[in-house]
Image: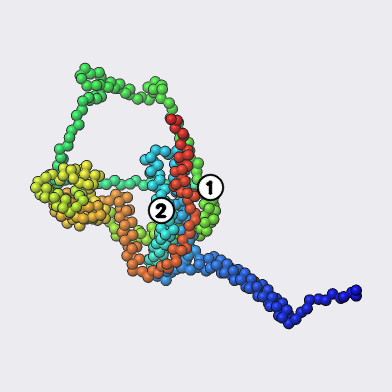
Amino acid sequence: MANRRRRGPIVNRRHMARQQRERLFSQYITIGSIVLIAIVVILIGYGFIVARVVQPRQPVAIVNGEEILTREFQAQVRYERSLLVSQWVNLANLMTDFGVTDASSQNFFIQQLQQIEFSLDASTVGRTVLNNQISDRLIRQEAARRGITVSEEEITKSLEENFGFFGGGPRPSPTAVPTRPATSTLSPLQMTLTAPTATPTPTITETVAITSTETTTGTQAIEMTPTAAVTDTVESQPEDVPTPTPFPTSTPYTREAFEADLAENLDTLERLGYSEADLRRLVESDLYRQKLLEAVTAEVSQIQDHAWARQILVGTEAEAQDVIARLEGGENFAILAQEVSLDQNTAIDGGDLGWFTREQFPEIADAAFSLEIGGISEPIQSQFGFHVIQVLGREERSLTTSEFDELKQSVFETWITDLRQDSDIEIFDYWANRVPTEPNVPAGGVAALIQQLQQQQPAVNP
């Protein structure tokens, strides 16, 4: 049989067309994959650029033409969150270290911890920070108009004092806090209105008389030995009195120690994206606020109008009208307050509210500062119920230092609110999507902490 030569596959036009289509299809797949990969890379890169470059430079709010950038907003949120988380951890450590197991103590700690967790809600902490930053811009703008400045030296000094460093010397001694002036002299009308009411007198079955000698009466006597006179001689000193031990001298807080503490804190803050410049700006903002507060409240006097009144608080207007009718019928205000007032804090004292300013009790201020001494008000509605008050006195009195500071803060906050209403403020809705959620409390939060405490409790044998 003759050898036949091997013949290759017969290639016709149809076969060639198929191979060409397959090559083209393969090329299309390759090109499409490359394009798809390129698009993904571009999108990832774009997202990275937007998140790391574009968004941080976008404003979350504009205050009178001045921008609050996303970067500084997010940095401040992380800083505030770190403070809240630190508080949470410290409270949790107290619970675990001391093994708090009784229900009342646990409830106290749990309420505090839950309040912190609520404050860490993204919407809550973000809105708080944004409002504070808007107020800061307004304060700085007003300070510039008034020529108020803060120097770098002032920032440095305040930062050092916040860490407890006072140039290596002792802490400054606190200034004496003036006390409230003596109680005013009551007029005859006031003495009549505030005459003491009859109260039950406790029966004393056994009295304790402290005398220097024994007694033969029916009372229990405690014999007191007269104290010997102290002289300069050694013999007069009691033999069993130990020599006082001097307290150890505290180690001075040196600049080196301060700088080490500062560096440690800055290292922690920088991991949150909060720089030393951010920290100094925060201190600067506080200084601007303090200086502007003093300027705005310069005309506020420490001498303020005060009213003295007492109240009966009831739940409905009908009950309040019944109280008024009983008072007009001659019943004693203090006794009636003890009987029906819902405010147990004041009812025990006959409803006495003491001396107060308009700001302290705004709900009843109009009546308290307009009625005649001894006058009874109509029912005054508030969120607590219906008040019936009687005015006992009205005069100018000096505020204590703490009360004066609170008044100035209140005046300043009202001024800030008015300034904000008169300012051009634009807030961008996307701020809510840019609130950082780190740092955060340990996983599980309060629930995990309670479980840990339960596991620490020793098993009780039946």
Give coordinates of residue 165: x percent, y percent: 48, 49
Q: Residues within 10 Å of mark 2 (few under 14, many from 20)?
A: few
Q: Secondary structure at mark 1?
A: helix
Q: Residue furthest front?
A: 1
Which residue is denoted by mark 2 in the rendering? 118
| Residue beneath the point at 56% across and 66% down | 48
Image quadrant in which the C terminus is located: top left
Q: Secondary structure at mark 2?
A: helix
Quarter where residue 209 is shown: top left
Is there any visible trace of residue 391 in the rendered image?
no
| Residue beneath the point at 76% across and 79% down | 11
Which of 244/339 is in front?
339
| Residue beneath the point at 90% across and 75% down | 2
From the image, state whether disc 2 or disc 1 is nearer to you.
Answer: 2
Q: Is residue 33 above or below residue 120?
A: below
Q: Is residue 186 left or right of residue 37?
A: left
Q: Is residue 290 left or right of residue 440?
A: left
Which residue is denoted by mark 1 in the rendering? 257
Q: Which mark is residue 155?
A: none
Give coordinates of residue 113: x percent, y percent: 42, 48
Give coordinates of residue 271: x percent, y percent: 54, 55
| Type of the residue with mark 1 | Ala
Give coordinates of residue 98: x percent, y percent: 45, 38
